[in-house]
Image (cartoon, coloured by chain):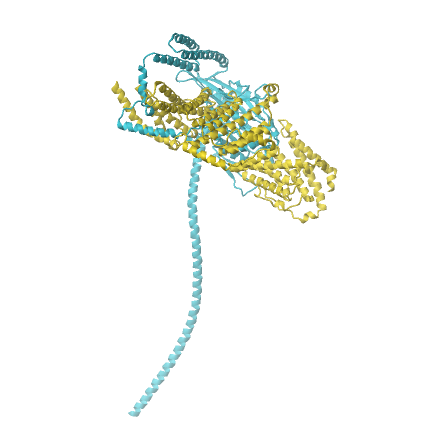
Chain colours: A yellow, B cyan
């Protein structure tokens, strides 16, 4: 190939290097009002390269073409899309060391870069055309270490292009082929393949084996990552999660990651495993996240942040992201406690000791069988031990008694405090409140395991103390939805406390009577609960204070339940004065009636609160009787 | 409210989606691109054809409202933005988005050509609308209208109205005012012209880049926010203040945001967003069920700023813009699909209610008890269930003698007072009331100190409480002062309803009104047309159905007929063949007969002759014989 050493070829190589430089480096500093200046310049150069390649290689290629033409041109690929698995490319086509093969690969590479360039400059259709041309050129070649990288790169690009257009099936075709090409190549050959950039550089500038491997493996990591997207789109969540895991693990292994970003991703992945009840995997992801986020270095001091903007940014970023990971940990503890509670509670929500014994036995059996095997394993040699030591700090097993539950609660609470440090009320209202809600939920779950009623009551009091002031401080226009959540939770918590107080009083005193103090306390809790339910109901009204005729689907059940509970709380209030009693009963009746009437007017609502409706109907029948009796008594007393 | 065909069902729609298709532009016409998009405004459908592969059937999408290439700016405003602005004027929050690929007319829809009244976009029209509303309001309604204008470029917030364009602003949140941007400039506007000027200033500062696809491609998200506060006398005689916020959002080209919503430099830094693994997090979070988990904040500044746009008291309208040319086929489809999905966007904040089966079960039992008691006619006290017996105890309390009782009463009084103060302070009482209250607190304190029989501890507690109240009161007073000062500065900016503000904006408002009326008329007509169309369609269908059944029958009959016909023909030809054959046979028989006859004739003659001759001869013989004998 005489022309390779010629000046012409040297010029082509220089142009290519220039185009790469423009596209990857200079484009970053293009002015805002001409954002693609360098990309357009790079495109021109690439087009010129393409023309010269066509011209001078076509000429000398055909002249002394003997061996190549004997091999028939492989059939063309379909226009867009790809057959699911097309591995003929390993056995058919020009071999890459043939002149025609090399020429085709070079043309394909230029088409590839042109395609990427067009996609980058928002000309997707044109980009697609170039990428398909690249595919066409490659279609004539046999897969080898000289071109396999391009085979995968172009499919990655086409895969993501179609995924961006939501044509996921097309995307899947390209990506799965890329995956199989990689796997087959690694099985059959496995030597570090040539990178496409090497087509256009002199011998001395060739990449080392290490560099080649790095680039090639990174391309495959992307294939896996895009496939994760594809499977997620198809709703194959488990498969998608596996691909996400592989992507993360490969990043770690190949040392191609940004620590904070990686850690955040691993922490997010933990949330997937948590919802699947796979706490061992969830914990592993979180431990890895904690360890890897440590690699990002120390948080700059406040003093340093004062001095430079860059340090200030870094401080904010690190603090925020570590707090995010802490929040994922909180959810881990919370879900573990909650799931354990679900397993252990009987049909009235109390601890079922039979279930407890049964689960203890099951755990012992499992321990004897040496437990479950971990499905995931993150880490490189130097991080493995530290990940394991973070894992040891909290169990992945369901807590079965108060001591175990408390251990998990404390870990969670510790992360709550950590997260609150960054997500302060002033500046991060929504986040701060979400953390408080979690804290409250942690107390709630722990209270289930607590046997002492008084202490249990105190835990609920803690919940009220942390939520009540906030609920009242928030602007109701901007935090409508959060306030609704808080009101509902406060109402339920007061209700819970009221029930506990009653249990306690009944337990303490053998006599059936309650003392004054208890009654006062009881009434206070009862009205507080009713007050918050009512506040919730008021928040549904229009700005003019009108009760909505139609309740939206997301508040339908809460609204009906709140009405029902308000009714019930009113009939529970203790009073010695008959007029007050009457008033309370009337309010109760009014609210029961609302539930019944609303469901009559909106038959579709009945399904949302079936039991409540049924009970309300009964009460609507019974309460008037009771009210009449009371009235009669009042009349005779007067 | 216009545009609501099924009021009942659409009430719950917080997100309304409309689609607008722009006409082919000069460049596209010159290049010879074909129109791939057909818009049927009456049916609300958009059909996209793919020309290169003819076998692919055209795709059709249906939306609340669609606008074709000939649609007018004023119509777009009246049909889409007007209801949103109306609800902002009622005190809701409203958001209007323009979404779509670059160069599909988002900025034209939002801003339009401001020099030409007919070509003005949603933003200037909303100004006219707002001030038109103020001008028509009752005399004792007061308004304060403020505007701010910002852009998000490269995940950095810039104040388009600020003095220093390079300054980056922080997005923050405060319990009392929600999400806000620290140090963002906001101007009070007194009329539509004010607003227009402010917008022009900001508009100049926007990041616009020239690309091959679009000479004026908006590179950033821009949010123009109008805050309208107004106070009016309610039925109770008090002033009621309400506030509504209108966000007008011009998004950067959709292709540029990918799945991250990133814009500008940040996108470029990832060189190729496609190849950047930094979006892995988005994929993972999509796998996570958000109910009881935490997904680390990946939301862009944009989502954070607009976080209350999808909530309960917010109305959102999204205008998806598309281009008509065939070369954008895939992008157009993608935008339409997104718009389709956007209809179902909801805010994730839901009420997580505790499932309380135990409670219900308990209640069921209580009802049972109650029923029994009622049936038995037993005395029932005011509270049912667990509370019923304790009531008597409560009665006793009233008669409880001695110190304990007094102590309790005294305390209760203090607490009651405290509560009253509390609520009064919260209500921001008037200064003289405050003085009065202070006196009361003082009095209360003295009374407390005088009560020597009170336990030390409780007294201290009560005193502390009082002191706290006092402090609060002082704070409230200070706040009050501050508010007064603020008020006086604000008062200058407040506009009183009914004042003639229209001036130059009058024309625009008139134009809007007119076009709205015209629109109403047109809509009625369109509705009628649509109905007629539907009827005709139905009729056509009916006829077609009948027709097809008739046609089928006819076909069947024709077939049968044909068959019978061929059978007939075959039979006929057979008959004629048989006729011919028989004729031959008859002829042969005839001739045979003839000859036979002839032969018979001959023979009979001969026989006759022979007989005759025989008879003759016999006779002769007999005669001869007789003669002989005789």
Q: Residue furthest front?
A: A368
Q: Name which quarter of the figure residue B354 lies in.
A: top left
Count every numbered label the image shows and give the total.
0
Which quadrant of the rendered structure holds the N terminus of chain A? top right
Q: Position of residue A505 (x, y in %)?
A: 36, 22
- Residue B156 seen in this snapshot: no
State whether residue A538 is above or below residue A368. above
Residue at position x 35%, y 83% in the image: B612
Q: Position of residue A313 (x, y in %)?
A: 59, 23
Could you say which is closer to the camera, residue A364 or residue B334? A364
Could you say which is closer to the camera, residue A70 or residue B468? B468
- Residue A319 seen in this snapshot: yes
In the image, taking residue B361 as reference, residue A1 lies left or right, namely right
Could you say which is closer to the camera, residue A5 or residue A626? A626
In the image, taking residue A522 as reference, residue B267 lies left or right, namely right
In the image, taking residue A324 as reference, residue A569 lies left or right, namely left
Q: Position of residue A74 (x, y in %)?
A: 63, 46
Q: Position of residue A536 (x, y in %)?
A: 41, 24
Which quadrant of the rendered structure holds the C terminus of chain A? top left
């Amino acid at each position: 190939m005489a022309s390779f050493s010629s000046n012409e070829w040297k010029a082509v190589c220089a142009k290519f290097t220039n185009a790469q430089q423009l596209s990857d480096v200079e484009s970053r500093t293009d002015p805002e009002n001409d954002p693609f200046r360098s990309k357009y310049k790079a495109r021109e150069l690439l087009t010129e390269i393409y023309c010269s390649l066509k011209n001078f290689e076509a000429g000398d290629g055909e002249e002394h073409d003997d061996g190549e033409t004997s091999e028939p041109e492989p059939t063309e690929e379909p226009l867009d899309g790809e057959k699911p698995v097309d591995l003929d490319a390993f056995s058919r086509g020009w071999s890459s060391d043939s002149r025609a093969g090399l020429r085709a690969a070079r043309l394909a590479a230029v088409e590839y870069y042109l395609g990427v360039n067009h996609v980058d400059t928002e000309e997707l259709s044109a980009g697609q055309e170039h990428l398909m041309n690249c595919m066409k050129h490659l279609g004539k070649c046999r897969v080898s270490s000289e071109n396999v990288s391009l085979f995968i790169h172009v499919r990655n690009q086409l895969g993501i292009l179609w995924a961006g257009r939501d044509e996921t099936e097309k995307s899947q075709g390209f990506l799965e082929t890329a995956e199989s090409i990689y796997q087959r190549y690694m099985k059959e050959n496995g030597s570090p393949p040539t990178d496409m950039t090497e087509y256009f550089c002199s011998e001395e500038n060739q990449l080392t084996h290490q560099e080649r491997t790095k680039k090639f493996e990174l391309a495959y990591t992307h294939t896996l990552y895009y496939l994760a997207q594809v499977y997620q789109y198809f709703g194959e969540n488990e498969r998608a999660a596996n691909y996400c895991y592989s992507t993360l693990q490969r990043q770690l292994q190949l040392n191609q990651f940004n620590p904070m970003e990686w850690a955040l991703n691993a922490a997010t992945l933990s949330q997937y495993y948590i919802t699947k009840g796979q706490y061992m995997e969830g914990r592993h992801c979180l431990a890895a996240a904690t360890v890897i986020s440590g690699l990002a270095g120390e948080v700059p001091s406040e003093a340093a942040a004062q001095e430079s903007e860059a340090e200030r940014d870094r401080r904010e970023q690190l603090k925020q992201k570590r707090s995010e990971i802490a929040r994922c940990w909180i959810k881990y503890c919370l879900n573990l406690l909650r799931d354990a509670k679900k397993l252990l509670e009987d049909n009235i929500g109390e601890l079922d000791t039979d279930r407890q014994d049964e689960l203890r036995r099951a755990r012992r059996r499992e321990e004897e069988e040496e437990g479950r095997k971990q499905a995931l394993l993150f880490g490189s040699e130097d991080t493995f031990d530290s990940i394991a030591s973070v894992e040891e700090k909290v169990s992945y097993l369901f807590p079965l008694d108060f001591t175990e539950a408390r251990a998990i609660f404390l870990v969670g609470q510790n992360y709550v405090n950590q997260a609150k440090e960054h997500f302060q009320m002033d500046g991060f209202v929504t986040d701060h409140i979400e953390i408080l809600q979690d804290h409250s939920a942690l107390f709630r779950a722990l209270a289930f395991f607590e046997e002492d009623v008084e202490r249990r009551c105190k835990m609920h009091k803690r919940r009220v103390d942390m939520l009540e002031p906030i609920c009242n401080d928030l602007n109701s226009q901007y935090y409508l939805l959060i306030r609704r959540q808080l009101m509902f939770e406060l109402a339920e918590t007061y209700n819970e406390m009221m029930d506990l107080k009653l249990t306690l009083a009944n337990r303490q005193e053998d006599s059936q009577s309650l003392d004054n103090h208890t009654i006062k306390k009881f009434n206070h809790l009862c009205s507080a609960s009713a007050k918050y339910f009512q506040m919730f109901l008021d928040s549904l009204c229009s700005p003019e204070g009108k009760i909505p005729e139609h309740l939206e689907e997301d508040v339908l059940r809460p609204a009906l339940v709140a009405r029902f509970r308000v009714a019930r709380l009113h009939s529970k209030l203790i009073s010695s004065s008959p007029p007050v009693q009457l008033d309370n009963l009337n309010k109760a009746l009014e609210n029961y009636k609302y539930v019944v009437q609303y469901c009559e007017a909106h038959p579709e609502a009945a399904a949302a609160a079936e039991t409540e409706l049924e009970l309300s109907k009964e009460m609507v029948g019974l309460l008037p009787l009771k009210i009449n009796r009371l009235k009669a008594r009042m009349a005779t007393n007067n | 409210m216009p545009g609501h065909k099924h009021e009942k069902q659409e009430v719950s729609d917080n997100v309304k989606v409309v689609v607008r298709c722009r006409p082919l532009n000069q460049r596209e016409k010159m290049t010879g691109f074909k129109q791939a998009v057909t818009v049927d405004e009456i049916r609300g459908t958009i059909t996209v054809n793919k020309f290169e592969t003819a076998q692919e059937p055209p795709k059709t999408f249906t939306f609340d409202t669609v606008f074709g290439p000939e649609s007018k700016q004023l119509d777009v405003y009246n049909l889409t933005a007007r209801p949103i602005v109306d609800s902002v004027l009622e005190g809701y929050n409203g958001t209007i988005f323009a979404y779509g690929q670059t160069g599909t007319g988002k900025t034209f829809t939002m801003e339009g050509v401001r020099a030409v009244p007919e070509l003005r976009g949603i933003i200037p029209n909303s100004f006219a609308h707002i001030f038109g509303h103020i001008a028509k309001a009752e005399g004792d309604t007061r308004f304060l209208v403020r505007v701010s204008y910002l852009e998000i470029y490269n995940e950095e917030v810039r104040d388009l109205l600020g003095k220093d364009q390079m300054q980056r602003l922080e997005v923050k949140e405060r319990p009392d005012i929600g999400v806000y941007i620290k140090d963002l400039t906001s101007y009070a506007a007194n009329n539509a012209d004010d607003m227009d000027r402010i917008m022009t200033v900001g508009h100049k500062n926007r990041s616009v880049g020239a690309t091959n696809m679009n000479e004026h491609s908006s590179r950033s998200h821009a949010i123009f926010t109008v805050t309208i506060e107004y106070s009016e006398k309610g039925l109770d005689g008090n002033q009621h203040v309400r506030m509504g916020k209108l966000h007008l959002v011009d998004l950067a080209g959709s292709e540029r945001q990918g799945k991250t919503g990133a814009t500008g430099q940040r996108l470029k830094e990832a060189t190729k967003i496609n190849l950047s693994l930094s979006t892995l997090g988005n994929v993972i979070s999509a796998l996570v069920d958000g109910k009881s988990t935490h997904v680390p904040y990946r939301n862009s500044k944009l989502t954070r700023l607009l976080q209350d746009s999808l909530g309960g008291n917010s109305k959102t309208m999204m205008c998806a813009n598309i281009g008509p040319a065939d070369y954008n086929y895939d992008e157009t489809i993608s935008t339409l699909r997104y718009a389709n999905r956007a209809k179902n966007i909801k805010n994730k904040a839901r009420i997580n209610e505790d499932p309380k089966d135990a409670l219900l079960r308990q209640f069921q039992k209580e009802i049972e008890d109650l029923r029994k008691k009622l049936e038995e006619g037993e005395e029932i006290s005011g509270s049912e269930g667990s509370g019923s017996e304790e009531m008597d105890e409560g009665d006793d309390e009233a008669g409880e003698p001695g110190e304990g009782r007094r102590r309790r009463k005294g305390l209760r009084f203090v607490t009651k007072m405290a509560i009253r103060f509390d609520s009064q302070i919260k209500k921001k009482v008037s200064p003289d009331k405050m003085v009065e209250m202070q006196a009361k607190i003082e009095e209360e304190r003295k009374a407390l100190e005088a009560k020597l029989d009170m336990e030390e501890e409780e007294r201290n507690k009560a005193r502390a409480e009082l002191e706290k109240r006092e402090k609060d009161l002082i704070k409230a007073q200070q706040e009050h002062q501050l508010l007064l000062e603020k008020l006086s500065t604000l008062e200058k900016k407040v506009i009183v309803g009914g004042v003639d503000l229209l001036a130059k904006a009058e024309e625009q408002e008139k134009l809007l009104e007119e076009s709205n009326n015209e629109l109403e008329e047109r809509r009625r007509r369109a509705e009628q047309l649509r109905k007629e169309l539907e009827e005709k369609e139905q009729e056509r269908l009916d006829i077609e159905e009948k027709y097809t059944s008739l046609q089928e029958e006819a076909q069947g009959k024709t077939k049968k007929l044909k068959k019978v016909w061929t059978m007939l023909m075959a039979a006929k030809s057979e008959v004629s063949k048989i006729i011919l054959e028989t004729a031959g046979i008859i002829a042969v028989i005839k001739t045979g007969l003839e000859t036979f006859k002839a032969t018979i004739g001959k023979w009979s003659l001969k026989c006759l002759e022979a007989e005759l001759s025989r008879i003759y001869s016999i006779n002769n013989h007999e005669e001869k014989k007789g003669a002989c004998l005789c």
